[in-house]
């Protein structure tokens, strides 16, 4: 039988250790008045030895103050800040077993110099959460023979339409720049 500690309001709670310990002792969860919480210096708020999992919570929010992963499941690592996936200049999700990298800043997939989502040969390009790419297809999926052109979140029917819309966009940007310089 699992060991469970609760406060007077019947919420999971233990000031001096895990509030939940599985029967075999391999899963431990730290809770304070019904909220997952553990000082990160002491370790993660959830630990499960059976599935090689840990997760840091501070006041119920997935977060850490340093650049170490907040979530780990076997070889998968995830970085979170203040409850959203976030890692600047590096992938926020890495899973070498799945050949997966996901670049996320402030909860939005984004990478300026390559695919923000990469799973094996499948690639997707995002900037600030918007599927887009100006120098080629925004989605490349060789397994399904998919090549999808997307510009600023709008899917193009083919490469020809993409080239036309990209030229229109560049011409407008150039025109707006000249117009701005006159004022």
Image (cartoon, helix red, strand yellow):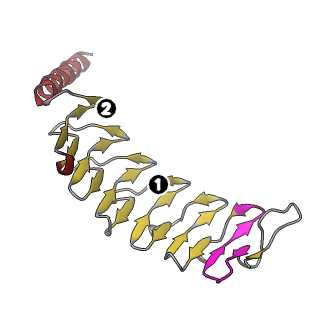
Residue under label 1, please give it: 85
Q: Nearer the viewer, residue 125 or 22?
A: 22
Q: In the figure, residue 170 lies in which quadrant?
A: top left
Q: Nearer the viewer, residue 66 or 146?
A: 146
Q: Earlier in the sequence, mark 1 or mark 2?
A: 1
At a point 18% along the width and 18% down the height, the residue shown is: 175
Please indicate whether residue 5 sits to the left or right of residue 154 in the image: right
At a point 35% along the width and 66% down the height, the residue shown is: 95
Q: Position of residue 109 (x, y in %)?
A: 37, 47
Q: Secondary structure at mark 2?
A: loop
Residue 105 vs 1, above or below: the answer is: above
Q: Secondary structure at mark 1?
A: strand
Q: Position of residue 162 (x, y in %)?
A: 16, 28
Residue 89 vs 131, above or below: the answer is: below
Residue under label 2, please give it: 153
What is the distance, in whole Å, between disc 1 and disc 2 at their CAs?
A: 21 Å
Q: Which residues are magenta?
A: 19-35
Residue 54 vs 133, above or below: the answer is: below
Estimate how packed mark 1 is, as few (under 14), some (14 to 19) or many (20 or more) residues with alpha carbons within 10 Å.
many
At a point 12% along the width and 31% down the height, the residue shown is: 159
The residue most toward the right is: 8
Say the numbered circle drawn on residue 176: none
At a point 41% along the width and 50% down the height, the residue shown is: 105
**Res 44 seen here:** no
Q: Nearer the viewer, residue 43 or 141?
A: 141
The residue most toward the bottom is: 24
Please indicate whether residue 65 sits to the left or right of residue 145 in the image: right
Residue 36 vs 53, above or below: the answer is: above
Query: Are discs 1 and 2 less than 8 Å apart at CB?
Result: no
Q: Position of residue 74 (x, y in %)?
A: 43, 74
Q: Is residue 21 magenta?
A: yes
């Amino acid at each position: 039988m699992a060991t469970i500690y609760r406060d007077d309001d019947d919420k999971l709670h233990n000031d001096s250790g895990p509030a939940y310990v599985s029967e075999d002792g391999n899963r431990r969860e730290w809770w304070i008045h019904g909220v997952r919480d553990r000082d990160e210096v002491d370790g993660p708020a959830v630990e499960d030895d059976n599935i090689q999992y840990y997760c840091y919570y501070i006041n119920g929010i997935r977060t850490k103050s340093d650049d170490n992963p907040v979530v780990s499941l076997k070889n998968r690592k995830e970085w979170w800040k203040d409850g959203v996936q976030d890692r600047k200049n590096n992938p926020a999700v890495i899973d070498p077993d799945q050949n997966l990298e996901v670049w996320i800043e402030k909860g939005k997939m984004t990478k300026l110099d390559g695919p923000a989502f990469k799973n094996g040969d499948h690639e997707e390009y995002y900037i600030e959460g918007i599927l887009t790419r100006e120098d080629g297809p925004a989605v490349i999926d060789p397994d399904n023979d998919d090549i999808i052109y997307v510009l600023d979140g709008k899917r193009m029917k083919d490469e020809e339409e993409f080239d036309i819309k990209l030229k229109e966009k560049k011409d407008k940007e150039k025109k707006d720049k000249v117009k701005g310089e006159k004022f």
